[in-house]
Structures are given as structure tokens and as C-alpha cells.
Amino acid sequence: RAQSCRNIMGFGQSEESKILSMSEGVKTKTETTIRDVLLPINQYARGPLEQNADKRTPFPFVFLLGNHSSGKSSFINHLLQRKVQEAGVAPTNDGFTIITAGDEDSNRDGPTLIGDPDMGFSGLRVFGPNLIHHVNLKIRQDLALHDIMLIDSPGMIDSPTDSISYVGSGQGRRDRGYDFEGVTRWLAERADVILLFFDPDKPGTTGETLSVLTNSLAGMDHKLHIILNKVDQFEKIHDFARAYGSLCWNLSKVIPRKDIPRIYTMCTPISEKQGKRPDYLPDKMNLKGKAWAASLADLEATRLEVEHQVSMAPERRVDNMITQLYDSASLLQMHIVVMEAIRAEYQQQRKKFYLLAGG
């Protein structure tokens, strides 16, 4: 199946790394176990597993979330070393965009992508036609990343009061036309790495973002990385401290732990001209000499750490597939135990009823 997907996307024969080979082997084993062992039991017991629970995307993928204008698209273009996504201050993307490498540039719409069972996104069909028409696939050649898919998401732009009004009431579905939090949860569960972007203007203050953290990303701390992007926009260190503190304060409201997870502070280079200073920091910050060099080196080191997390997606895929197999088996076991307890109680009550009726 993975080979057929490579042929569809224009890939030729190539030698895969040890990690990718191991990932393919684990993927085959987990899919076989789910398909041949768990799904028949699930069907017999009317269990909670999806019918296509054994289907995964052909390549590991990184899921990018964030506020409107938080720099997701710019970071994608930087990772791929090619302009694939439109970037700007105004909202430029109102849907989910899946990006993968291929031998030639081509686009596929949502119905074509979701209708292909080998691509692993057929499960999104349950969210309705409004979502399907807001999903597309971009296949691009000459990308810096191969064998890793990137998924860009629409920016979250509402206010906290809006989020409070629709959490649990279904208003979120009316706002976008589909269950955004449900789709986010579906993709996040299958993603190998999740990057959550914030920007200085809205450091965690959008209600939809906080709601997604609470409802869609709960239990995914092991693959979630929080990023405060565009820190090159700060003119004074006090501005940075206020934005960072505000983000920590807002995250503390939705993360049920005493310790706040690490927040990567970085910025994406706008241009990297050979022999010239990269546009990491504006001149208005008046950083000179050692101070400028230290700040630049720190921002670049943090960005390289985030890029390293992205490159770890194939290795993390192995862990995630094993975790998915364990979670699926545990969920099915719990369902069977509960149903068996209900059946035993029903048989006992039925026996009592006949005894009383006969006496």
C-alpha cells in the first residue's frame, strides 16, 4: 500500500533509511494485528473501534496548529525551502492543507483525497461535506523534506467569550460549518508531531485555541510542542516578558499540571542571502556586538531544535503506532468487560423476574 502511494505521488525507487524501514515494518505488523485480530472481535462485540482503524497515512506527518497570523505558513515554506503556502497578515488559508513531496507539482481536492483509502484520510468523511470541501492535497517537487507530510490548519481567530459560548453547545460547528475541534482531535491522534504556534499579538488569548488545547489536544503532551513565534517583533525586552508571561498564564488555565511545558521562543528567517545578515532581528532592537550575536544565536538554536523535532517524525511514528495498537486493544477490552458485566447483570435480573413470576 505504501508503495502504491509512492507511485501515485510520483516517487521512484529509492533506498530508505533504517528508521523508515523499521517504521514500515512496524506499520505492517500493527495494521495486520488490528485488521486480523482486533477488528473481527470489535465487529462481533459491536465495539467502539473505527472500521478503518487499521489504515494509516503512507508517510509520517507533522500537524501545525495556531492562531491566525502566527507564522505557520512561513515556517512550512522555510522547512520545505520553497514557497508552498501563502503567508500574510490577513487570513490566507481557511482549510486543512496536506503537503507532500513528489516528482511534479499537482493539487487534489478534498473529495479525491478522502475518497482514496490508501491515503489514510477516509475517516474524515464522518465530519461531513463542509469539511471535505475544506481539505486539499498539495504535491510539490524539489522539497527539502522527503517522506514526511505536513498538514497546515486554518488559523484560530475568535475571542475568549465566543469560545465560552460555544464550548459544549455545538456553536463551533455553525461557526465553521463543521466540527473543527473534532477534526483537530482526529488529525492530532494520528499525527507524529504536533506544533502549536502562538504570536506576540495573541499569546494564547484566542478562546478557540484554549478550547482546542482543552478538548482536542488533551493527553497528547508526548508529541505536542508549543512555540511562541515571531519574537523578532519585540522592540524591548519588557514586551517579550509580558507576552511570554501572558502565554504562560493562559496556558496554566487549560493545562491541568503545576509545571508548564516548554515553550520554544523563535522566529522564522524571512530571507537568508548568502554573505549577509539573515532577517531574524530588526535593526530597531538596537542590538550590537555580543548582545546581537547572542540573541541571534539563541533564536537560531531554538528554531533548529524545532526543526529537529520535525525531522524526528519517522522515528516517533514507530512509538505512536505501538501506542495506537495498545490503546485500541485496551479500549476494546474495556468495552468487552463492560458489556459482559451488563450481560451478567441482565441475566441475573431476568432469572429473578421469572422466579418471582413463577412463585
Image: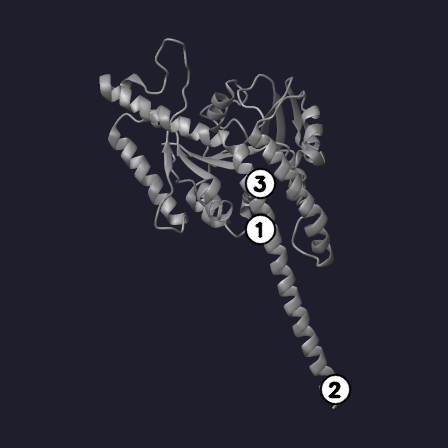
Name the mark on residue 327: 1
Residue 174 lies in what quarter of the image? top right
Question: Closer to the N terminus: mark 2 or mark 1?
Answer: 1
Q: Check disc 1: other Cα within 10 Å, few if <14, some if 14-19, many if 20+.
A: few
Tell me which numbered mark, 2 or 3, is placed earlier along the sequence: 3
Q: On the image, numbered disc 3 is attached to which residue? A: 190
Asked whether, in this view, residue 182 is left or right of residue 41, the answer is left
Please tell me which residue is depicted at 58% across the width and 42% down the height of the picture.
321
Under mark 2, the amino acid is Ala
Q: Residue at x 67, y 42 (%)?
A: 31
Query: Is there any visible trace of residue 355 in the rendered image?
Result: yes
Instruction: Tell me if mark 3 has few (under 14), some (14-19) or many (20+) residues whose alpha carbon lies within 10 angstroms of its own.
Output: many
Residue drawn at point x = 64 percent, y = 40 percent: 124
Q: Please tell me whether mark 3 sits on a helix, a strand or a loop.
A: helix
Q: Establish if 2 lies above or below 183.
A: above
Q: Position of residue 4 (x, y in %)?
A: 71, 28
Q: Residues within 10 Å of mark 2 (few under 14, many from 20)?
A: few
Q: Secondary structure at mark 2?
A: helix
Is residue 87 or residue 337 the one in the foreground? 337
Amino acid carrying label 3: it is Arg
Q: Secondary structure at mark 1?
A: helix
Q: Is residue 153 visible?
A: no
Give left or right: position of 12 versus 187: right
Indicate which disc residue 357 carries.
Answer: 2
Whichever of callouts 1 and 3 sits on the residue coming sooner in the sequence is 3
Q: How far is mark 2 from mark 3, CA to CA? A: 53 Å
Image coordinates for residue 278, horizontal then vertical, percent: 37, 15
Evaluate if marks 2 and 1 touch, with contact meaning CB atoms under 8 Å apart: no
Q: Position of residue 111 (x, y in %)?
A: 69, 33
Mark 2 or 3: in front is 3
